[in-house]
Image (spheres, rainbow, N blue to C red):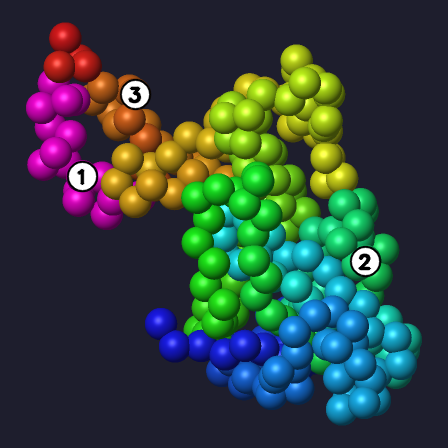
Amino acid sequence: MSGHHCIEIKPVKLHASQNEIKAAIQPTTVLSGATDTEIEIAALKSKLGWKHPVGLFGYSKDSTYKDLWIYFDLQDHSSPLNEVANRTFYMYGLDGAQCEPNWTIRGSALVIRIEPDYNFSPDAKFIPLISTQEMYDTIVFFRDCKDSPRTIAMKRDSVRMFGSFAMNPPTAAGGMNMNGFYMGTGFRSLDQVKKDAEVCDACGKSQALLSEKLKKCQGCKVTFYCSKNCQKKAWKAHKKVCANLCK
């Protein structure tokens, strides 16, 4: 899939039309050639005139790790409110802090992809470029999902930690106790995390990645699917397994 190093999201209303939202999502070369945070911040100040560039972690629609880094000007108090960016990225505090969001985005937000921490996400795939379609899909997903973006981030964080600790059990508490996980985004019980980690038997997406609840096969009551389409695709392979499980 083709894409861009950096995507700009211009101010747009949360429930604007599809065409208006797509028009607000544009590739930009402002951060071309930047290799670290200091260089990126310097570029934002010199090229855009931002007074106080800050960054945030974020998730794209289908990512299992925090794959987005979002820049905006914290001292911009006069530009229009960026309703779409405020909703989509309402997950974490400023500059990587794992706390309640305490910021407001006015003017443009610039989005880049960041690499995973392979200690916690050993199987994650790093795709450096972002397409405008992926950005649009991400915006629509977090806008329309019943859960808030912060809740979705908490689910994904806890599933990632659960998988990491399953492979490398911690010797100290380190965010986990016998009952669940404590994170900057909140607390998830082990029962909740296990449900969040359940996956669709066809596409492999976990509950934490989906906007709707996984549904059990009505035959075996064991296998999960995210949609009727996935169930139909998997039925040929699942049919015999289902019959055995029903015995």
Q: Which residue reaches farthest top? A: 247
Report x, y in % for residue 62: 46, 54
Mark 2 burial class by Cα count in 10 Å: few <14, some 14-19, many 20+: some
**Magenta segment boundaries in residue numbering:** 227-243
Mark 1 burial class by Cα count in 10 Å: few <14, some 14-19, many 20+: some
Q: Nearer the viewer, mark 2 or mark 3?
A: 2
Tell me what residue is drawn at x 76 percent, y 91 percent: 47
Task: Determine whether 175 is above or below 91 in the image.
Answer: above
Considering the numbered disc 2 on the image, is that residue within a helix, a strand or a loop? helix
Figure quadrant of the C terminus = top left
The answer to which of marks 1 and 3 sits earlier in the sequence is: 3
Residue ID for mark 3: 222
Q: Nearer the viewer, residue 38 or 62?
A: 38
Residue ID for mark 2: 94
Q: Nearer the viewer, residue 77 or 169?
A: 169
Mark seen at residue 234: 1
Tell me what residue is drawn at x 66 percent, y 86 percent: 30
Inspect this view and state whether residue 47 appears: yes
Task: Determine whether 139 is above or below 59 in the image.
Answer: below
Report x, y in % for residue 229: 23, 47
Name which quarter of the figure residue 24 lies in.
Answer: bottom right
The answer to which of marks 2 and 3 sits earlier in the sequence is: 2
**In this rendering, would 81 be left or right of 78?**
left
Q: Is residue 165 magenta?
A: no
Name which quarter of the figure residue 157 lies in.
Answer: top right
Q: Amino acid at mark 3?
A: Val
